[in-house]
Image: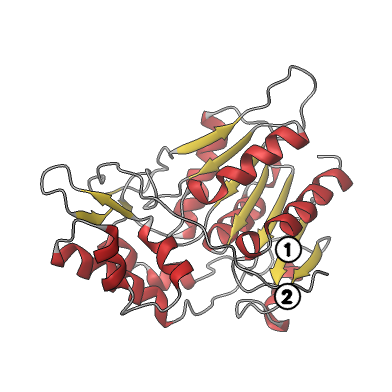
Amino acid sequence: MRRNFTIPLKSFLPIRNAPHKVQYSTKPIPLAYFKASIQQDNTQGSPVIMLHGLYGSKQNWRSLSKRISNNLNRDVYAIDLRNHGESQHIEPHKYTSMTSDIAHFIEKHSIKKPIIVGHSMGGKVAMATSLLHSDIISGVVTVDIGPVKHSLGGNSLDYLNGLEEIERTGVSTLKEADSILSKYEKSTVIRQFILTNLVKDQNSKNYKSRIPLDILKNSMADISDWPFISTLRYLGPSTLIAGKHSTYINETVLSAYMNHFPNSSVSFLETGHWVHSEKPEEFYVLLSEFIKEHEL
């Protein structure tokens, strides 16, 4: 277990794509993704699908995806979940819908028995996919979240309010946007992360949100929920990688997790909730050891 605690201070740049039109559908939707492919033609291991958390995107996993692909000889897909990144803005934003999206993605891209890795909200999607579609995956790695209903914390809604104020104010620089967001969040690192959800309007040249603020505001209860029955089990390879100082993991959460994943291992790193960002090297080691141990 690692004892040092650092948060890398990175420069995040917005991706300039036009926001999608808001729609509603009960059917699975296609998802935007980044694919890191192996360069050699020899035998490859199980593909990996990486799922981000709330307010995240496929960009969060880009560096790790390339490293896993190159070092562990496999294809890696980093996905934008619905209402995030470059994927479609659409209701409902529920775990049943997001899980259907992932199952559809696996089928559409003919991905054979992938390992699903998910952080926070993406971790719940990963767990749900393994519980509901165990026959199409080979393993699941959950990052600092459990199969329980939990509180998102006051800041989650504050971030949406901050992005709304940025849109209303009509700012043309990231410095101005950061100044507004600083009223809602003191941490520079977290503000930089939230600001990746801004894009420039092609007409006004002002920054606006690329995520659907109205949909996500109305979906907070669904995002904090865990709507699946306790009798569901996944008996395949699984592991939970958690932050020792995270507020999302406690004995109740661990008990619920082991109920659904009785054959799982659990590892703790000296981090908060952002395990893979705070300790990227240690996280990579745990993930690669899991893959090698189970010969995936």
Q: Position of residue 97 (x, y in %)?
A: 45, 52
Q: Quadrant of the N terminus?
A: bottom right
Q: Quadrant of residue 155?
A: bottom left
Q: Nearer the viewer, residue 291 or 150?
A: 291
C-alpha separation, residue under disc 1 versus residue under disc 2: 9 Å
Q: What residue is rendered at 72% in x and 63% in y?
A: 241
The residue lying at 14 percent from left, 67 percent from top is: 169
Tell me which amino acid carries mark 1: Leu
Residue 13 pos. (x, y %): 39, 50
Q: Quadrant of the C terminus?
A: top right
Query: Does 190 sit left or right of 274 as displayed?
Result: left
Residue 145's spot in the image, x, y percent?
A: 62, 68
The residue tagged 1 is 240
Quarter-wise, where is residue 254 in the image?
bottom right
Residue 246, placed above or below residue 54: below
> In the displayed structure, would residue 72 be above or below residue 95?
above
Q: Is residue 284 left or right of residue 85?
A: right
Q: Residues within 10 Å of mark 2 (few under 14, many from 20)?
A: some
Secondary structure type for disc 2: helix
Q: Please determine whether, in this image, residue 247 is positioned above or below residue 231.
A: below
Q: Which mark is residue 254?
A: 2
Dot 1 or dot 2: first in sequence order is: 1
Q: Is residue 235 visible?
A: no
Structural crowding at the residue carrying mark 1, measured as other residues with C-alpha within 10 Å and reported as few (<14), some (14–19) or many (≥20): many
User: What label does residue 163 carry, if any?
Assistant: none
For the residues labelled 1 and 2, say whether their Cβ atoms are less than 8 Å apart.
Answer: yes
